[in-house]
Amino acid sequence: MPSVPTPSKAGIVETNTGERHIPSSVRPDGSKRKEIKIRPGYKPPEDVEVYKNRTADGFKNRGSGGVPGAEGLKDDKDEIPATSNKNAKRREARKKAKAAEEGGDKVKEESSAAETKEASKAEEVDPEVEKEKKARNLKKKLKQARELKEKKEGGAALLPEQFAKVIKINELIRELDALGFDAEGEPKVKKEDLTS
């Protein structure tokens, strides 16, 4: 009894004589497909085996301890919680907000308490410190504008943005004056301080 050749993934059958072909078959509508002969040496993409690097596979499957073949030894404790991911944190915040909207009074109270804490921290900022910070920023802009003005006077061509900075010199000086600083960015000495 002759053995029935097993077809490859592409359906190619090899005969005892070495010829290869795709056997005839019947279509769903009842018509018959002809047998297709395959050239010697041709290997269809379905039959080409994917190369597997054993070392790389071993590295991927090494498990938690870095030991090859130790896949089953992984602890659940080692897994990183979902909230460490930035997007997961956002999702959690949305869920909490949604729960608060649906009537979760406890969540509302907790969130309002957190908001009041943040608001009190914002109020604790010293206005004097903010004033100095703004003055430093203006002083820096003024210095850059003066350097650009010197370049322009030296004959260098300025870009439109740079030219706009040069034009704003007087405006920067006015802003510094309004904050209580002189044109150099130094705090103005009050007249009362000079007389005493």
Image (cartoon, rainbow, N blue to C red):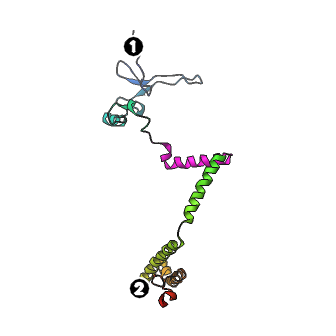
| Residues marked 1 and 2 touching at CB (< 8 Å) | no
Q: What stretch is highlighted in magenta?
A: 79-104
State the residue in front, 169 or 82. 82
Most distant residue in the front direction: 196
Mark before the other along the chain sequence, 1 or 2: 1
Circle 1 packing at 10 Å, graded few (<14), some (14-19), many (20+), is: few
Residue 157 visible to the viewer: no
Secondary structure beneath disc 2?
Answer: helix
Secondary structure beneath disc 1?
Answer: loop
State the residue in front, 193 or 1. 193
Q: Name the residue under label 2.
A: 150
Most distant residue in the bottom direction: 195
Residue 118 visible to the viewer: yes
Residue at (60% x, 47% y) in the render: 96
**Relative to 22, is 63 above or below?**
below
Q: Say which of marks 1 and 2 sits in front.
A: 2
Label 2 amino acid? Glu
Q: Where is residue 35 in the image (x, y as percent from the top left)?
A: 46, 24
Disc 1 to disc 2, how far (Cα)? 96 Å
Q: Position of residue 137 (x, y in %)?
A: 47, 75
**Relative to 86, is 69 above or below?**
above
State the residue in front, 78 or 121. 121
Q: Quarter of the image holding residue 2?
A: top left
Residue at (43% x, 27% y) in the render: 9
Most distant residue in the right direction: 103
Label 1 amino acid? Ser
Verify whether residue 101 appears in magenta. Answer: yes
Q: Where is residue 69 in the image (x, y as percent from the top left)?
A: 34, 30
Verify whether residue 95 appears in magenta. Answer: yes
Q: Quarter of the image holding residue 27?
A: top right
Residue at (38% x, 31% y) in the render: 73
Q: In this view, does 179 lie to the left or right of 77?
A: right
